[in-house]
Image (tube, grey):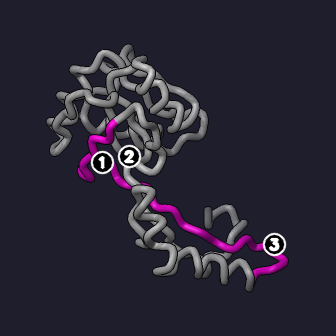
Amino acid sequence: VIATGHVMPATETPLAVVPVAVAVRKGAAKPDISTPEAVKKMLLAAQRVSFPDGARGAAAGVSFEETLRKLGIADAMQPRLLKVQGGANAIAVLARGESDIGLTFLSEIHNDGVDIVGALPREISTPTALVGYVHTKSQVAEAARALLSFLASPEVADIYRSLGMVPGR
């Protein structure tokens, strides 16, 4: 973002961090995802895995595809992957029974038809940082700075937590 020249680097404001998480259909057994090896075993045992399509701009999808490469199973998983538009849709597909496992950002899992298993281990999935900046052409830069300051404040931290995010850095 900074390299584009469209934002003021000095205004970089960490807002929250969000992990990619695993979900299963409501009432299904929750698989072990405590280690990279357990995640690999879970994925290879699944008939279908739904997740947002990284090629269509979904950061959670890009992250999950990197996880598959880190686990060394990207090629083996291709026939089982169901890439969809958006994280909410990946979870809706799971809730309808069209996949066994659904993955997206924890903050996007809000469907009564699924249960959250948990976040992928950090060794194989780096949480995504949400960062705010003021645009270089902002006509109200001070107001934008004030908004970023508020969005990074303790007053907003509980909202981030309620959405499955970790406030700040």
Name the residue type under label 1.
Ala
Q: Which of the numbered marks, if any, corresponds to residue 20?
A: 2
Depicted 90 relative to depicted 33: above or below: above
User: Disc 3 marks which residue?
Assistant: 137
Q: Residue at x 21, y 35 (%)?
A: 39
Residue 91 image position (x, y, % from top left): 45, 33
Residue 26 picture quarter: top left
- Disc 1 vs disc 3: which is toward the camera? 1
3D distance between C-alphas at marks 1 and 3: 37 Å
Q: Is residue 114 magenta?
A: no
- Verify whether residue 129 appears in magenta: yes
State which region is magenta.
Answer: 115-141
3D distance between C-alphas at marks 1 and 2: 6 Å
Q: Residues within 10 Å of mark 1 (few under 14, many from 20)?
A: many
Is 88 placed left or right of 78 in the picture?
right
Q: Quadrant of the C terminus?
A: bottom left
Q: Marks 1 and 2: CB-CB under 8 Å?
A: yes
Element on which disc 3 rests:
loop
